[in-house]
Amino acid sequence: MEILQTVHSYLAYAVLAVLFIAVGNAIIGLVSNKIFTMEKDLRISLFALIMSHIQLVIGLVLYFVSTSGFKAIQLVGMETITSNPAARLLALEHPLINIIAVVLITIGWSRHKKFLEGNKKFRSIAIFYGLGLLLILSRIPWGQWFN
Ligand code: HEM
């Protein structure tokens, strides 16, 4: 399904953008000792959470319909995939690392709700969303994305 790949490809810009904004906002909130507000800080963090979950679901479906995902492993075998960096990235590393990234983002969200103090909320978002963002950035198929 071509359309899924197109959606996943364009949504990636939005996901990365809102994650950058959420992490930046949390770091600023933390270092300048701001109050964590429902109107701004909660909304930005929630929006980033929702966008990354939508991308996760689309990615999971894409993994099973795309010829670069699970089908590639079935077709040529695990050994061939693991010995080819480009194929390994699409069929194994990108999916696995991004699932872990979204889990971290979700943990950051859940933890922030448990705290009453603004700086603890900001710290939870900054650390867990930040780690998630770094993981995602480490396994983007850059060459393919910009082609
Ligand atoms: C959550 C953050 C994620 C981001 C930002 C992201 C981003 C991207 C980008 C930029 C591409 C290249 C698109 C292109 O070729 O134009 C891609 C491809 C792909 N992604 Fe993701 N992705 C994410 C999560 C996932 C997850 C969780 C899975 C699977 C479990 C997944 C499965 C795939 C697959 C299979 C492809 C290759 C599609 C193909 O070439 O046919 N992605 N992703």
Image (cartoon, grey):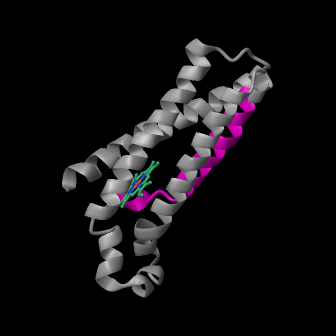
Residue 140 placed where, x, y %? 47, 56
Tell which quarter ligand 1 is in: bottom left
Q: Is residue 58 magenta?
A: no
Of residues 25 and 124, the one drawn nearer to the viewer in this rendering: 124
Q: Identify which residue is drawn at 20% across, 55% down.
A: 2
Position of 144 relative to 108 (above/below): below
Q: Quadrant of residue 70?
A: bottom left
Dominant SS of magenta comes to helix
Q: Is residue 137 visible?
A: no
Regarding residue 77, the answer to whether it shows in the image is yes
The N terminus - image quarter? bottom left
Position of the C terminus, as image quadrant, is: bottom left
Name the residue: 51% across, 55% down. Answer: 98
Residue 135: within the magenta? yes
Q: Residue at x 48, y 28 (%)?
A: 47
Q: Is residue 108 above or below residue 77?
A: above
**83 with respect to 77 (left or right):** right
The quadrant holding residue 124 is top right
Q: Position of residue 44 (x, y in %)?
A: 54, 25
Identify the magenta region.
121-147
Q: Residue at x 61, y 20 (%)?
A: 41
